[in-house]
Amino acid sequence: MSNSPLDPVYCELNTIHKVITRGIRVSLENVKKYRTIGFPNPRTKKGFIDYVRSLILTLDNHHYSEDDIAFPVYQKYAPEAPYQLLATEHHNMLSILNEMKAVLGHLDNPATEAGGLDSLQSSLSALEELWNPHINCEEGHFCAHSLLKSIPEKEQVQIGKKISAHAIKNSKLLSLSLPFLLYNLPVEERALFSQGIPKLVTGFLVPVVWRRKWMPMKPFLIH
């Protein structure tokens, strides 16, 4: 499979999948650790909560973008894909994300922290179990080599623009969720992904204006 910048559908889909896959893995690895040894300090706890919250927002936005923006177009060109199954899996994952949102509030209270970590680990494990076969199915049907041959370039660009606009409009805490997107990618892929983001954002807002807000997440990100 190609990962060329000329493959916008493939790049968009697989890049966000990589971000979320790493986000789930890192969250699960660390919740297991903190269940055993506890949080070393309040800053680490804040960073972990912000990281998981950003994962929830990113995955929620991603599924909305697929269901409401990408899939209606894909259905014209890849009608054989199991759209109903994918939509059902999105709904099931949304239920898990809602559980995770509720659990995060328990981590701020020492009296409920241990139980909150137990519940969060259970939710993340369930999410990971659904996520991996789900993206294998999506990428098997929607990778660029099949779609690019049939979807007009203009329509591909429109999909990308609509998804980007939706992500910006509907992403709460952009000062956390955008660094989450960028720094869960290796440097080369981050640079490619950043090409679609205004330089004012990647060169000034993220590293300067928003830095204090997202820095507690740094231990969980790729530097």
Image (cartoon, helix red, strand yellow):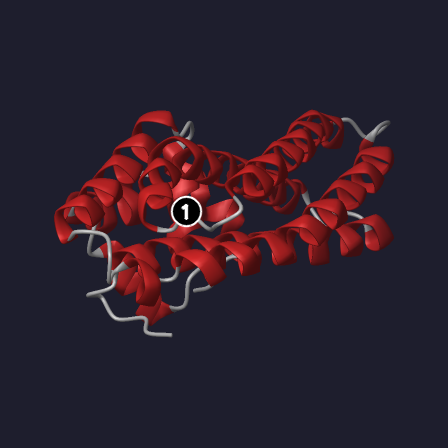
**Relative image position of residue 25 (x, y in whole percent):** 64, 58
Query: What is the quadrant of the N terminus in the image?
Result: bottom left
- Furthest residue to the bottom? 1
Q: Is residue 3 above or below residue 65?
A: below
Residue 67: quadrant of the picture: top left
Identify the element where label 1 is drawn.
loop
**Relative image position of residue 190 (x, y in whole percent):** 33, 62
Look at 86% across and 54% down and name the residue there. Answer: 36
Instruction: Say whether residue 55 is visible.
Output: yes
Look at 23% across and 52% down and name the residue there. Answer: 151
Q: Sort mark 1 into few (<14), some (14-19) or many (20+) by Cα contacts within 10 Å.
A: few
Is 206 positioned to the left or the right of 126 in the image? left
- Furthest residue to the front? 80
Query: What is the quadrant of the C terminus in the image?
Result: bottom left
Q: Is residue 112 above or below residue 202?
A: above
**Relative image position of residue 138 (x, y in whole percent):** 49, 54
Look at 83% across and 54% down and name the residue there. Answer: 37
Residue type at tag 1: Pro
**Relative image position of residue 49 (x, y in whole percent):** 62, 38
Of 123 and 182, which appears nearest the observer?
123
Look at 32% across and 74% down and name the residue there. Answer: 2
Of 188 and 139, which appears nearest the observer?
139
Give the residue number, with chain letter if any, for mark 1.
79
Is 215 positioned to the left or the right of 107 in the image? left
